[in-house]
Amino acid sequence: MKRVLRRNHVILLVLFMLLACSMNMVAKDGVLYRGMPKDLVIEAIGKPSATSFDQNEEVWTYIKSSLSEKYDKVIIVTFDNSDKVVSYQEQLMPFGGMREHTKSLPSSSVNVPSPYRFPLSYRLNDKEFSLLYGKVKAVSFDDDKYVLLEVASIRCYYTCAQCAKLMKLFSFDDSKLKALRIMASHIVDPQNVYVITETMSFSDSKDRALKLLQTY
């Protein structure tokens, strides 16, 4: 009974957070909404500046610049396997900074991605991370842990050390990779990916982690 109540509590918490985030996403520009198909996204905000994908999702990145502004607006739209919008994010980057670092991203082979995709200040502070870590650790089942990470990753950003610590809450490499896939696009210091690969037990899992991180 306690197990069922705890699971229901997790589900209710997640539904509440998703509702809040969904309302926030629609309010951004009033043009994108969850479930929107790709052709309408292009019609609304144009073609992306960069794209990436894996077997579970596709990410479109837009860089909106204005000579009158000191910052580039970076828009990140994520699609599921049915090519429908599942998340929308906006950040402000110092003018020109995002474009310079986008050019330096590796285009082939397994390399560490260019650092500074997001400012380090975006990452969870110690108090915020400790709260998230405690909630994920308190959940008994991996599926519930994934749900909490998915909800948190709508608005949260992680250092590699924080990501690695959360991954250690999972027992097997495949489970750790699934958790990494949820957090990978929100890592602020990809130059430190070795911290993440060290959580893996086998060399092929480390290679898979690097390939996954390269996608973002």
Image (cartoon, grey):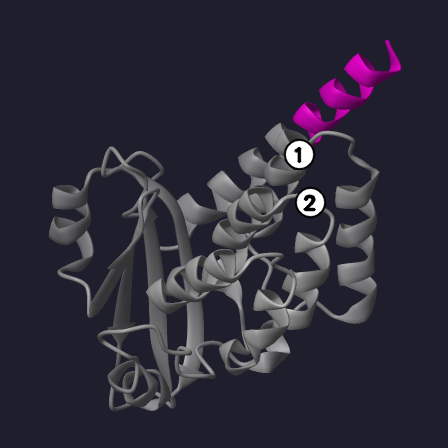
Furthest residue in direction right, as rendered: 2
Find numbered disc 1 in the image and state the secondary structure of the residue it sits on.
helix
Q: Quadrant of the C terminus?
A: bottom left
Q: Position of residue 180 (x, y in %)?
A: 54, 54
**For this view, does 139 lie left or right of residue 20?**
right
User: Residue beneath label 1, please?
Assistant: 142
Is 200 placed above or below 23 here? Answer: below
Q: Is residue 71 visible?
A: yes
Tell me the residue at 27%/48% (across/down): 31
Is 83 placed above or below 125 here? Answer: above
Q: Residue 126, which numbered label?
A: none
Q: Position of residue 38 (x, y in %)?
A: 17, 44
Number of numbered discs present?
2
Q: Position of residue 54 (x, y in %)?
A: 31, 51
- Which of pointers 2 and 1 lies earlier in the amino acid sequence? 1
Q: Who is closer to the viewer here, 42 or 201?
A: 201
Q: Residue 170, which numbered label?
A: 2
**For this view, does 20 lie left or right of residue 104?**
right
- Tag 2: amino acid: Phe
Q: Is residue 158 visible?
A: no
Give me the C-alpha separation between circle 2 and circle 1: 7 Å
Please tell me whether residue 16 belongs to the stretch shown in magenta.
no
- CB within 8 Å, label 2 to label 1: yes
Tell me the residue at 53%/81% (across/down): 119
